[in-house]
Image (cartoon, grey):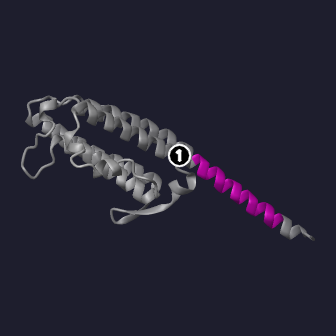
Amino acid sequence: MNINRKTALKTLALSALGFSSLANKKKVKNEFSQQFASAWKSSESYTLRLYNQMPEDKLDWKYTSESFSWRTQFVHCITFNTAQLCGRLKIENPTEAKSKIKDYWKTLSKADLENELKEFYAWVGKIATETSPETLEKMEPYAGEDIPVWRLFYALENHIIHHRGQAICYLRLNNITPIGYIGW
C-alpha cells in the first residue's frame, strides 16, 4: 500500500478530530453524570422527606374527586418518568409488571410506596450513569422540540418538581406545615 504525504496528513487530521470528538463526548458524559447524580440525590432526599410528612391514613386523600390522591402524586412520578425513559432509551420498564397487577399501586402501605420511590430513584440514577455518551447526545422529541437525551433526565426531574409542588399544597390543605426547601 502506497501512502503519500497528503493522505497521511489527512488521515492524521481526521483521527485527531475523532479523538477530540470522543474526548468531548466523554467529558459531556462525565460532567452530566456528576452534576445529575448530585441533583438527583438532593431530589430524592427532598421527595422522601415531603412524602413522609403525610400520615398513612391520608395516603388516598385528594382535595377534589378529579384530583390525584396523595399516593397517586408519587406513583405518577414513578410510572410516568420510568415509561418516558424506557420508551426513549428502548430499555425494559421495571414498573410494567407491577402496573399490570390489579390495584398494585393502590394497595401499597406508606412504607412500601416509600421503598418504591427509593427503588425508582436508584434505577434512574443507574440509568443516567450507564447511558453511553452517544445516547446522551442523541436528540429526542420532547414537549414540541428536540432535546438531547441528557436534558430529558432534567425534564423528568422538572416533572417531579411539579408534583412535589402539588404535594406541598396537599400538606397545607391538611394543616401540615411542609418542611423547608432543600436546595441543590
Q: Is residue 3 above or below residue 173?
A: below
Q: Residue furthest front?
A: 102
Write the residue at 55% across / 47% down. 29
Q: Is residue 95 above or below residue 38?
A: below
Q: Is residue 96 above or below residue 174?
A: below
Could you tell me residue 74's position as x and y percent?
25, 42
Write the residue at 65% across / 53% down. 22
Could you tell me residue 14's position as x and y percent?
74, 63
Q: Left or right: where does residue 138 sit relative to residue 48?
A: right
**Magenta-tinted stretch:** 9-27
Residue 148 in view: no
> Circle 1 — which element?
helix
Q: Residue furthest left?
A: 64
Q: Is residue 151 above or below residue 184?
A: below
Could you tell me residue 18's position as x and y percent?
69, 58
Indicate the quadrant containing the C terminus: top left, top right, bottom left or bottom right: top left
Q: Left or right: where does residue 19 sit relative to residue 142?
A: right
Nearest the viewer among 121 and 161 is 121
Could you tell me residue 27's position as x and y percent?
59, 46
17 falls in the magenta region: yes
Disc 1 packing (10 Å; few <14; some 14–19; many ≥20): few
Dominant secondary structure of the magenta stretch? Answer: helix
| Residue that badge 1 annotates | 130
